[in-house]
């Protein structure tokens, strides 16, 4: 297995180098120093800022600097604040939302999908699918606005129950329900519609396999066959679905962090793009690209662990 992992890492090195190269070229289509200072910058100002920010160095040197994972560079838009410090501050808020949301969404969606497949074509199945379609048809922003207005503002004003914060974040487990529970619930409601339909199609396809028909014909309990054996054999697409969200799990949920004013990685990156803060953009994208490649490799390894028919070669 380790040989396979090492080989996959070597294969993906050119891909990673290409992603970083494309990023740096895209950011330098226009002069970064000019974009940072604005249209009123003088030639002297441009020369000074390039020297200060290291933009006067050859492109290859700047490229190696990004690849070195040196996050101790200073943010352009936040003088005196290093990118490494911004990373440390933003990881916990992001994971405080995305990790519970992914866990709850996966458990609920898979359970509903199995129930729907078990009652395929019956009113229970149709009702669950209608709810799923309605849930995924409404815009994410609509859920955020209604959640903040009804779940936070009106609940506090009219009922007197200050259950959820409209925005902000405070670290600590005791503060988590107040600041993070509402964003997590919104994320679960939105994601559940997409995931439930996907998992249901997987379960319906799996329920028609020969081993299911044979097991039921031999007198095995259909409920046990579907909720135990079928789930085990459907793990490949389930793992694929979950692992594709892993990089986004670390990077955070952009909309939730922006609208709930949560200082996570998604909000930091969004703000850096607005402020033309190149060191932050480059650092965050290098992390994201590495996570995406590692998640793909880990997906293949998990395939082999859950399904003996899969061999790493």
Image (spheres, rainbow, N blue to C red):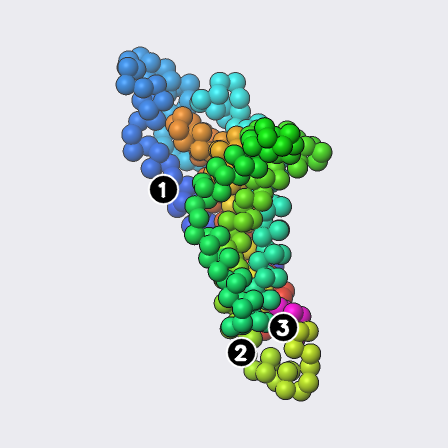
Residue 74 is situated, as x and y percent measured from the top left of the image, at 49, 23
Q: Residue extending furthest bottom?
A: 218
> For residue 98, which quarter of the picture?
top right
Spatial distance from mark 2 to mark 1, Cα to Cα?
45 Å
Q: Residue 262, can we see it? A: no
Give the foreground label among 3 and 1: 3
Span shown in magenta: 225-232
Give the answer, above or below, for where 12 lies relative to 307: above
> For residue 54, which quarter of the picture?
top left
**Residue denoted by label 2:** 208
Residue 131 is situated, as x and y percent measured from the top left of the image, at 51, 57
Pick whichever of labels 2 and 3 is earlier in the sequence: 2
Residue 153 appears left or right of 47: right
Check the picture and name the quadrant holding the C terminus. bottom right
Q: Residue 120, can we see it? A: yes
- The reply to whether callout 3 and callout 1 are in contact (CB within 8 Å) is no
Q: Helix, strand, or loop for circle 2?
A: loop
Q: Helix, strand, or loop for circle 3?
A: helix
Residue 268 appears left or right of 62: right
**Residue denoted by label 1:** 22
Disc 2: CA contacts within 10 A as few (<14), some (14-19) or many (>=20): few
């Amino acid at each position: 297995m380790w040989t396979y992992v090492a080989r996959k890492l070597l294969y993906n090195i050119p891909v990673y180098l290409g992603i970083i190269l494309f990023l740096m070229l895209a950011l330098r289509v226009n002069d970064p120093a000019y974009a940072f200072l604005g249209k009123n910058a003088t030639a002297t100002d441009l020369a000074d800022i390039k020297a200060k920010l290291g933009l006067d160095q050859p492109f290859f040197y700047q490229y190696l600097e990004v690849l070195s994972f040196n996050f101790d560079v200073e943010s352009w838009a936040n003088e005196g604040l290093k990118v490494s410090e911004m990373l440390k501050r933003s990881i916990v808020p992001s994971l405080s939302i995305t990790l519970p949301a992914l866990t709850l969404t996966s458990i609920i969606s898979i359970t509903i999908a199995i129930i729907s497949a078990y009652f395929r074509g019956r009113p229970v199945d149709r009702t669950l699918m209608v709810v799923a379609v309605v849930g995924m048809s409404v815009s994410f922003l609509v859920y955020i606005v209604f959640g903040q207005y009804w779940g936070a503002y009106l609940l506090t004003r009219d009922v007197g129950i200050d259950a959820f914060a409209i925005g902000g974040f405070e670290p600590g487990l005791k503060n988590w329900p107040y600041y993070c529970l509402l964003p997590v619930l919104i994320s679960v409601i939105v994601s559940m519609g997409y995931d439930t339909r996907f998992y249901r199609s997987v379960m319906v396809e799996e329920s028609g396999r020969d081993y299911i028909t044979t097991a039921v014909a031999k007198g095995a309990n259909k409920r046990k066959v579907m909720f135990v054996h079928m789930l085990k054999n459907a793990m490949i697409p389930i793992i694929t679905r979950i692992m594709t969200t892993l990089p986004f799990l670390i990077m955070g949920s952009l909309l939730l962090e922006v609208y709930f004013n949560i200082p996570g990685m998604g909000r930091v990156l969004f703000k850096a793009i607005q402020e033309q803060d190149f060191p932050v953009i480059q650092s965050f994208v290098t992390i994201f690209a590495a996570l995406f490649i590692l998640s793909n490799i880990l997906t293949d390894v998990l395939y082999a662990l859950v399904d003996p028919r899969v061999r790493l070669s």
